[in-house]
Image (cartoon, grey):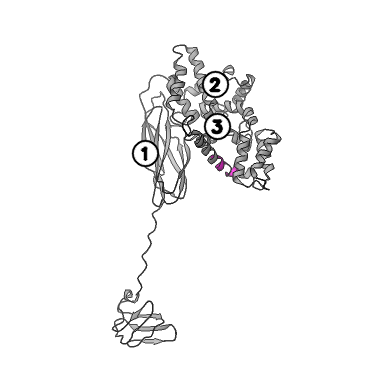
């Protein structure tokens, strides 16, 4: 404003070197630098006693300007590194996800492995989940399980990607590349070695690295046979079956199977309730951090189950199948019907009572508890056991659905269910586990 004309409107009295017009709010008109005799006059924002009209805007604004508030730095999630590498072996590795910027609130992001030249069928175990950052938390780790094979294939890589951020944005490094550096082939199929064979049971069934005591125990079950090949064959069958029968798998993988069965029944035109990718993803959610017989494992499992089931009943597929307007009786009856179970009056009422007498089944917590009651119903557990045992031969050993190549339908699955039923669930007499672990398809995951 220096050297120019200006107006100031305020409740002031002016005299000398300018004119004041109007009443109440006065208008002072003058020219910068012109003599302004008289005064004093003023208000809360301008006071002038004598001298000259101010020659700059800053002089007119007697009150200090507020200090600008800076824009908070963005809350960004990304991988710590653009690439990682690991030597091919039966092992695990960790990739790190970081959060920077304003981390005062919570945030979350999904992650998933994506096949490259290295594939989850042979070279590594599929991994997926959701990372939850608490307020102030800035680092999360993802464990990846790496497998060994006897193929000379050079270095191979796969990707891990982040998606669906909440409470944050994805940074530039939303994908990282993992390179598996090829090792020298041992000359034989790794799973012919007792320790490597047991290691794969931990990776495939339990989604974790072996604990030392378990590894030693199960490896010795096979190694104790020495050169007795018949003994070795039987021990390998029993060891692998033991992982399916274990408390750890029954309360993780088999629970996921039963939750899908109770919620939706079987898939359309299929004798099974879920697909391999659904099983792998959801079983990892329930089993993460669980090592049976380690301190606190029951609480970790309970927390995982509650978190998973709370998420499960919020999924669009579930809410579409079970609208909130259903009465508790309708909700519970539909679950039992999908599970193929006729409950006792007491079982049915116990599930309905989870809603506390409400007129509708809208309460999320009650829905979770009722679904869990049905999924853990002993009749459901018993009647689905053989079907789940067979399905796991495809999901765990072959890493595929029963009706995809080299199969074209569920005929093979149906054959093994019938055979297992024929022998009252005796997998040794039915020769089911033996057939799968000796199959060319299974062995070629790791070598010839």
Task: From this view, report whether residue 19 is shown above or below residue 297.
Answer: below
* Badge nearest the viewer, 1 or 3: 3
Front in this rendered view, residue 167 or 377: 377
Which label's residue is closer to the chain start, 2 or 3? 3
Q: Report, in whole angstroms, how far the alpha carbon at label 1 lies from the one at label 2.
A: 39 Å
Residue 433 numbered mark, or none: 2
Residue 331 falls in image quadrant: top right
Which quadrant of the rendered structure holds the N terminus? Answer: bottom left
* Image spot of residue 146 (x, y percent): 42, 30
Which label's residue is closer to the chain start, 1 or 3? 1
* Badge nearest the viewer, 1 or 2: 2
Front in this rendered view, residue 96 or 104: 104
Residue 251 numbered mark, or none: 3
Q: Report, in whole angstroms, how far the alpha carbon at label 1 lies from the one at label 3.
A: 35 Å
Report the magenta residues as a range.
308-318
* Badge nearest the viewer, 2 or 3: 3
Q: Report, in whole angstroms, how far the alpha carbon at label 2 lies from the one at label 3.
A: 21 Å
């Amino acid at each position: 404003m220096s050297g120019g004309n200006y107006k100031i409107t305020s409740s002031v009295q002016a005299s000398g070197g300018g004119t004041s017009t109007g009443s109440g709010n006065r208008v002072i008109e003058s020219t910068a630098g012109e003599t302004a005799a008289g005064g004093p006059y003023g208000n809360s924002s301008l006071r002038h006693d004598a001298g000259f009209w101010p020659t700059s805007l800053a002089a007119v604004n007697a009150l200090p300007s507020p200090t600008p508030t800076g824009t908070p730095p963005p809350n960004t999630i990304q991988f710590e590194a653009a690439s990682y590498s690991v030597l091919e072996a039966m092992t695990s590795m960790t990739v790190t996800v970081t959060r920077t910027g304003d981390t005062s609130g919570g945030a979350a992001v999904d992650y998933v492995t994506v096949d490259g030249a290295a594939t989850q069928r042979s070279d590594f175990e599929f991994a997926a989940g959701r990372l939850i950052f608490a307020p102030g938390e800035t680092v999360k780790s993802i464990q990846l399980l790496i497998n060994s094979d006897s193929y000379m294939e050079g270095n191979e890589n796969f990707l891990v990607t982040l998606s669906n951020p909440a409470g944050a944005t994805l940074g530039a490094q939303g994908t990282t590349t993992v390179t598996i550096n090829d090792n020298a082939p041992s000359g034989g199929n790794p799973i012919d070695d007792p320790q490597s064979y047991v290691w794969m049971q931990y990776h495939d069934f339990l989604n974790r690295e072996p604990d030392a005591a378990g590894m030693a125990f199960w490896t010795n079950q096979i190694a104790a046979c020495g050169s007795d090949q018949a003994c070795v064959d039987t021990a390998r069958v029993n060891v692998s079956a033991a992982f399916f029968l274990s408390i750890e798998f029954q309360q993780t993988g088999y629970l996921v199977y039963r939750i899908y069965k109770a919620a939706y029944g079987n898939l359309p035109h299929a004798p099974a309730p879920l697909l391999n990718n659904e099983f792998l993803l959801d079983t990892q959610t329930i089993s993460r951090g669980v090592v049976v017989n380690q301190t606190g494992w029951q609480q970790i499992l309970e927390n995982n189950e509650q978190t998973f089931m709370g998420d499960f009943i919020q999924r669009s597929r579930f809410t579409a199948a079970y609208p909130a307007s259903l009465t508790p009786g309708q909700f519970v009856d539909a679950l039992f019907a999908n599970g193929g179970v006729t409950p006792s009056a007491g079982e049915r009422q116990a599930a309905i009572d989870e809603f506390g007498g409400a007129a509708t089944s809208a309460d999320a917590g009650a829905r979770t508890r009722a679904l869990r009651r049905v999924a853990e119903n002993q009749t459901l557990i018993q009647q689905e056991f053989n079907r789940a045992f067979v399905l796991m031969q495809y999901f765990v050993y072959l890493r595929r659905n029963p009706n995809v190549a080299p199969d074209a339908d569920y005929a093979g699955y149906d054959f093994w269910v019938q055979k297992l039923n024929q022998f009252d669930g005796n997998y040794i007499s039915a020769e089911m586990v033996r057939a799968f672990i000796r199959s060319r398809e299974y062995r070629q995951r790791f070598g010839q």
